[in-house]
Amino acid sequence: MSSKSTNAVTGTVIEALPDTLFKVRLPDGTELLSFLAGKMRMHRIRVLIGDKVTVDIDPYGGKGRITKRL
């Protein structure tokens, strides 16, 4: 699957979990379990509770990937 077909939305981090997992609240009120993208891990970009982030949602549902901290 190419990166051009991703569904990116903006949300707010509401909870930090172990192993770089986060709960993100989307604008429509749903909560999504998300993990950090590889580039964010590689450059050690920190994500804290309350941060606005861009999340690429998996087309099959379930999880999302945090790709940018706003």
Image (cartoon, rainbow, N blue to C red):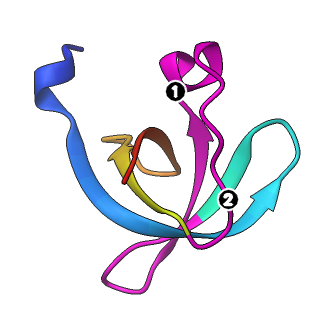
Kindly identify which residue carries mark 2. Answer: 48
Q: What stretch of residues is rendered in magenta?
A: 24-50
Q: Amino acid at mark 2?
A: Leu
Check the image and report above or below for 5 versus 55: above
Left or right, residue 31 beside residue 14: left
Is residue 32 located in the magenta-colored stretch of the structure?
yes
- Quarter of the picture holding the N terminus: top left
The percent position of residue 65, horizontal first and vertical second, equals 47, 38
- Quarter of the picture holding the C terminus: bottom left
Kindly identify which residue carries mark 1. Answer: 37
Task: Single out the mark in the foreground, 1 or 2.
Answer: 2
Regarding mark 1 in the picture, which secondary structure is present there?
A: loop
Left or right, residue 28 beside residue 20: left
Left or right, residue 27 beside residue 32: left
Q: Residue furthest right?
A: 18
Instruction: Write the residue at 61% across / 13% down.
Output: 42
Q: Marks 1 and 2, how far apart in space?
A: 15 Å
Q: Amino acid at mark 1?
A: Ala
Check the image and report above or below for 12 versus 3: below
